[in-house]
Image: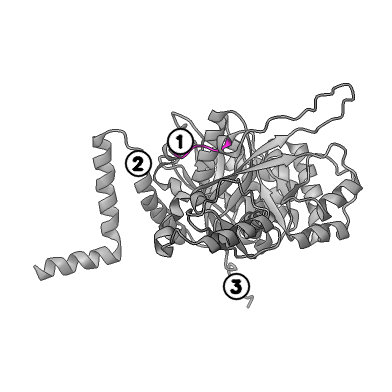
Amino acid sequence: MSAPMDFNIPTCERSTLKEKIKMAHRLGYKAVAINIFIPELTQTSKKKKSQQQDIAPAKSLKLSDLELQELLGPTWKSFRQLTRISATLADVQHNFVMQACTALNVDIITLDVTEKLPFKLKRTTINAAVQRGIKFEFQYSPAIRDSTLRKYFIANAQQFVFCDKGKNIILTSGCEKAMELRGPYDVANLGSLLNLNAAQSKAAVTLNCEALLKHSESRRLNKSVSKVEKLEEIPGNETWLLDKLRVHSSLESVNGGSRDIAGIHGIDSSDEETSVDGPAAKKIKLVQT
Amino acid sequence: MPLQDHDAHVISRYIVCKLEFGCRVTLPDLTQDAVYRAIATELQVLHGDYGTACARKYPNLTVQYLNPSTNLVMVRCSRDQCKQIQSCLPFVKKIGEVDVFLHTLHLAGTIRSCMKFIVRYHKSQLPLLMSECRNPVERKKVQEMLTDSCADSGRTLGLLERSTTSQ
């Protein structure tokens, strides 16, 4: 299988997280996303102070390079760790779902399959989301834990597949323990229970996940094909490009131009001084699927 | 004269799984019987009487091979029922009292093909074992096994022959 990925490993204490990541690596997953939940923000009128929780920055959620190396052994480099934030809708009604599918700036919509869906699934809303590239996620760990949850999982997921013909689905675990993870081949076999055909179930674990990653990158860039990055922010394994490009440091016009471009794309141009003598920015071509 | 009835050609599928234990210090010994019973209970829960009944016709659902040191299991089922069985494998949580799950590695039509896969799989696991060796004695053993296994491959054998004949 090409690059199976698991996109929902909820955060928990460090030791359990390490176990989960080690298990995911052993089972053959190439990328994993660590999930942090923002609890429903309820309106309590008395409190003036808003209930904004401090969300830990992405770096502190992931395992550091050293920890990863210790944990996974010699093949640690091919394993990617990603992070993700989930917000929950408190009172799920049809209008909210409609808005989420058409307007909200999200990558994944998770349908809670452990209870009866409180709203009716409509083909129009789902198609709107599919066109925008949003993926619908089903978690299989609840189904493994409990028998009644299993029935709801199969019922809700089948209903969804019926509405949307099996496109844009990803299967993820929402595992609480490392022992609730399953290998990618097994997860793809679960697709047959949900009326997905063989190709669609495989795609649910591999291709759709890759498309999701590209979609999340493109979300930051509005509509574009190329992305502009500052040279200082290039990740370590791509610094060889600097030599290849042989960038000269005295290009004023390029600097001015790149600054504008960064503005248009709405990139977090952390306004460090793009000094006149600083290196010019680097262009990356983004391949959209 | 009545026609002799011959057995129709039996088509089965062989699934190679690995028993994954999680982080345990001592790995318990499991029998083929215990693994079979775990899969059969899951089949009953998920596909009911129909599933269990289909698993009884020849070729029945059986656990053909279990390697206690590497925890590889080979399960046989009929080709028609293969999808059903594969769909209930992820739901196995416990075998006996032990928390285990099955990680499907390979699906094949013959035992021979499965065995070939198992040999390749063992060979690919040797370098990983190497990194987990704790003292030089173990490391030397694993290294010898590695070089032996490389020597089996056709290309290296050819190279060896050429180098010995040229000398």
Name the secondary structure under disc 2. Answer: helix
Q: CA distance from mark 2 to mark 3?
A: 60 Å
Name the secondary structure under disc 3. Answer: loop
Check disc 3: other Cα within 10 Å, few if <14, some if 14-19, many if 20+.
few
Q: Which residue is mark 1?
A: A67
Q: Which residue is mark 3?
A: B4
The residue sitting at 39% across, 54% down in the picture is B119
Amino acid type, callout 2: Ser
The residue sitting at 81% across, 48% down in the picture is A156
Point out residue B38 in the picture as x, y percentages from the top left corner: 61, 39
Could you say which is closer to the camera, residue A204 or residue A82? Answer: A82
Between discs 2 and 3, the one toward the N terminus: 3
Residue range of the region highlighted in magenta in the rendering: A61-65
The residue sitting at 61% across, 70% down in the picture is B5
Q: Is residue B41 above or below residue A52?
A: below
Q: Which residue is mark 2?
A: B131
Could you say which is closer to the camera, residue A121 or residue A63? Answer: A63
Q: CA distance from mark 1 to mark 2?
A: 16 Å
Q: Residue furthest left?
A: B167
Q: Mark 2, chain letter?
A: B
Q: Is residue B152 left or right of residue A141?
A: left
- Residue B57 appears in the picture as rendered: no
Q: Is residue A253 left or right of residue B160?
A: right
- Residue A83 appears in the picture as rendered: yes
Check disc 1: other Cα within 10 Å, few if <14, some if 14-19, many if 20+.
few
Point out residue B151 in the picture as x, y percentages from the top left corner: 25, 58
Residues behind callouts 1 and 2 on a single chain: no
Check disc 2: other Cα within 10 Å, few if <14, some if 14-19, many if 20+.
few
Q: Mark 1, chain letter?
A: A
